[in-house]
Amino acid sequence: MAIFKTLLVVAQVLSALGVIGLVLLQHGKGADVGAAFGSGASGSLFGATGSANFLSRTTAVLATLFFICTLSLTLMGNYRPAASLGVMGSAPAVAPVVAGASAPAAAAAAAASNPSVPAVPK
């Protein structure tokens, strides 16, 4: 399970870096699309508008991958396996733990701090 979490974190970081890089490569609507790949957009590898479509689709794919990795890591982080019932199938009897001291000691300390409360007999 730890290997799967590590792979998800690596995929999440790589997709985040890819989204950042692709967003920085893209220009606004008013900018010349061919400026990212040289002088003319029509002479580029993807055609006149192909580079914009390729970059936007790749950004969408990487953003979806980032979202899926984040959701998966969140679900895996919140998963708590059920407590084992043991060999006999019954829950183990556990005594309640009182923070700090036992009940008679806590009552004696409360009686010492407040004289109107009678002390617990021993």
Image (cartoon, rainbow, N blue to C red):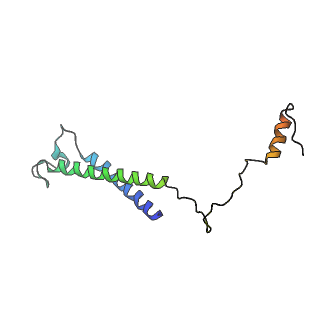
Taking the view exactly as shown, the residue that stands out farthest to the top is: 116
Q: Nearer the viewer, residue 44 or 84?
A: 84
Residue 25 lies, in percent from the top left, at: 25, 47
Q: Nearer the viewer, residue 30 or 87?
A: 87
Q: Nearer the viewer, residue 95 or 54?
A: 95
State the residue at coordinates (22%, 50%): 57
State the residue at coordinates (85%, 37%): 111
State the residue at coordinates (86%, 41%): 120
In the image, residue 58 sits, relative to residue 116, either above or below, namely: below
Q: Is residue 118 left or right of residue 71?
A: right
Q: Is residue 37 visible?
A: no
In the image, residue 83 sits, relative to residue 120, either above or below, namely: below
Residue 30 lies, in percent from the top left, at: 18, 37
Q: Nearer the viewer, residue 94 or 89?
A: 89
Residue 35 lies, in percent from the top left, at: 18, 45
Q: Is residue 98 visible?
A: yes
Q: Is residue 114 left or right of residue 100?
A: right
